[in-house]
């Protein structure tokens, strides 16, 4: 099966030397891409900037900003049987990018931010018949209710509810614990386990779903 996975954070430029980003390390997305490859799938990995080794036997598409990720993903998604949006895409970017390095001045600085495109929502709107679309929900509060709402609003088949408020697992760690919610109401608790094992379990469930 042709599989597209996104991973890592995005970087939104403020000026020539500064950007806005988040704590995603890309480990969960890379684990999903590698597990899909090892299950015999043809994998494309669209990745924000991470400090991980380039996986063998996978087509890697490196991107920086949410806009670049949107372009790379939307161009490839129509050909994919399974798309998993694991990337921690920035929700906002600076409205104006300063050319060169910004100089400091007296007083406070206010950065005006504008919304980025919700890539997953766009994918949900353009989803071809038979494609499986999987999202992640990073939440610190009301995990399952918020994840279920995203599943519905973005027209997904599955969503992995990820409690990012925990300091022991999740962001940055080698382990994760998720609840996988299906659009048909099915619910699976996965982990705590290595991100690789969590990735294998997610893939097994979503590819067995026969949709
Ligand atoms: N996502 C996306 N494009 C964005 C923001 C998020 O494709 N601009 C995707 C993420 O990759 C993830 C899913 O949407 O698969 C949910 O991301 P999350 O940050 O949990 O939810 P948001 O919809 O951005 O809402 P909020 O951050 O306010 O909870
Ligand atoms: Ca978000």
Image (cartoon, rainbow, N blue to C red):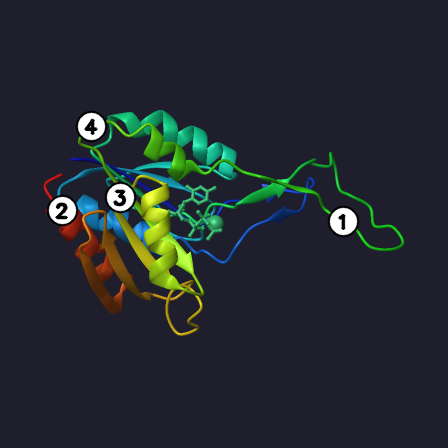
The residue tagged with tag 3: helix, strand or loop? Answer: loop
Q: CA distance from mark 2 to mark 4?
A: 23 Å
Residue highlighted by disc 4: 129
Give the number of callouts: 4
Q: Give me the residue at 53% from left, 45% from top.
A: 91
Image mark for residue 56: 3
Q: Please tell me how crowded label 4 is: few (under 14), some (14-19), or many (20+) other residues with Cα within 10 Å.
A: few
Q: Earlier in the sequence, mark 1 or mark 3?
A: 3
In this view of the protein, which residue sits in the foreground, 162 or 98?
Answer: 162
Q: Earlier in the sequence, mark 2 or mark 4?
A: 2
Image coordinates of residue 9 in percent, x first then y, are: 47, 49
The residue tagged with tag 4: helix, strand or loop? Answer: loop
Q: Is mark 1 within 8 Å of ligand 1?
A: no
Residue highlighted by disc 2: 39
Image mark for residue 110: 1
Q: As drawn, which residue projects farthest toward the right?
A: 106
Q: CA distance from mark 1 to mark 2?
A: 48 Å
Image coordinates of residue 183 in percent, x first then y, are: 23, 47
Q: Give me the residue at 33% from left, 58% from top.
A: 161
Q: Is mark 3 within 8 Å of ligand 1?
A: no
In this view of the protein, which residue sits in the foreground, 137 or 88?
Answer: 137
């Amino acid at each position: 099966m042709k599989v597209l996975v996104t991973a890592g954070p995005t970087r939104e430029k403020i000026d020539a030397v500064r950007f806005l980003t988040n704590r995603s390390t890309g480990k969960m997305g890379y684990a999903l891409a590698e597990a899909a490859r090892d299950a015999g799938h043809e994998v494309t990995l669209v990745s924000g900037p991470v400090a991980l080794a380039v996986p063998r036997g996978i087509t890697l598409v490196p991107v920086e900003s949410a806009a670049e990720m949107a372009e790379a993903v939307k161009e490839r998604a129509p050909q994919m049987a399974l798309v998993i949006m694991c990337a921690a895409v920035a929700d906002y970017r600076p409205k104006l990018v300063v050319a060169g390095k910004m100089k400091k001045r007296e007083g406070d600085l206010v950065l005006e931010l504008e919304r980025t495109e919700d890539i997953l929502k766009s994918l949900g709107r353009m989803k071809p018949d038979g494609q499986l679309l999987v999202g992640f929900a990073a939440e610190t509060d009301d995990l399952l209710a918020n994840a279920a709402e995203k599943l519905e609003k973005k027209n997904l088949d599955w969503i992995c509810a990820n409690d990012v408020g925990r300091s022991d697992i999740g962001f940055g760690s080698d382990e994760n614990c998720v609840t996988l919610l299906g659009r048909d109401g099915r619910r699976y608790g996965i982990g705590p386990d290595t991100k690789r094992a969590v990735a294998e379990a997610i893939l097994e469930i979503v590819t067995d779903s026969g949709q």
